[in-house]
Image (tube, rainbow, N blue to C red):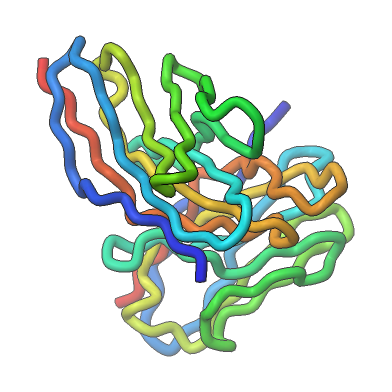
Amino acid sequence: KAGVTQTPRYLIKTRGQQVTLSCSPISGHRSVSWYQQTPGQGLQFLFEYFSETQRNKGNFPGRFSGRQFSNSRSEMNVSTLELGDSALYLCASSLIIGGALPNEQFFGPGTRLTVL
Amino acid sequence: AQSVTQPDIHITVSEGASLELRCNYSYGATPYLFWYVQSPGQGLQLLLKYFSGDTLVQGIKGFEAEFKRSQSSFNLRKPSVHWSDAAEYFCAVGARGSQGNLIFGKGTKLSVKP
């Protein structure tokens, strides 16, 4: 079974631009979470989507948004890029099997965003 | 608020030596705990997880972790380190009712000396 794929793997943008990152979860997985990883702040949760609905959201400004499609693929968008948005953006998918317990998350390789 | 602390930023061990990576969590209810490993340029791979039951959890690649509620700890161990274990290790806590949101520690980078 193919793993989580993220495109593009590398991206260079300039301040003020916007960017869209894509994530394809493992087949059958309906939950997709996004994380930002930086050397200073570490791994921080951005948001989680399940069945095309945002279920949880981290403490990020409204410039960060996302969506999920009916096939569970997800995109995240960052508008008006700032230098501090340079980071590795990781997507993780999980198979929701019911109940309220956390599920194992399978991570993609990430998209390395550099903002100049 | 939930939080995870990994006190050691960087650890160096000799190949064949034992390893223990420390993790302390802060969470008001039953924690759901994870250890992930990240190799350079890669995403995170789950090593093991603890939800309930036996407090000693076995994972992949010969790793194990022990949950100690009294110490709010979930330390990762390996009896004999291999050069391929050099990577960054992250401890994380998940919350009931918040399935897609893991709180991660800042990570411990492991270097292995030949």
Nearer to us in this view, A26 or A40: A40
Please state the horizontal and vertical placement of residue B67, each as a whole percent of the image. Answer: 48, 36
Q: How many marks?
A: 0
Q: Quadrant of residue B50?
A: top right
Residue A83 image position (x, y, % from top left): 32, 80
The residue depicted at 52 percent of the width and 41 percent of the height is B34
Residue A61's spot in the image, x, y percent?
Answer: 53, 86
Which percent across, then down, holds residue B49? 57, 35
Q: Quadrant of the C terminus of chain B?
A: top left
Residue in the picture at 61% in, 58% down:
B29
Displayed quadrant of residue A56 = bottom right
Residue A7 seen in the figure:
no
Closer to us: A64 or B25: B25
Up/down of A47 relative to B83, above or below: below
Locate residue B33 relative to residue B81 in the image: left or right: right
Residue B9 is at least partly visible in this image: yes
Left or right: B24 in relation to A78 = left
Q: Is residue B63 above or below residue A57?
A: above
Which of these two is toward me, A49 or B103? Answer: B103
Q: Residue furthest front?
A: B70
x 37%, y 36%: residue:
B75
Q: Is residue B22 left or right of residue A112?
A: left
Residue B67 vertical position relative to residue B15 in the rendered view, above or below: below
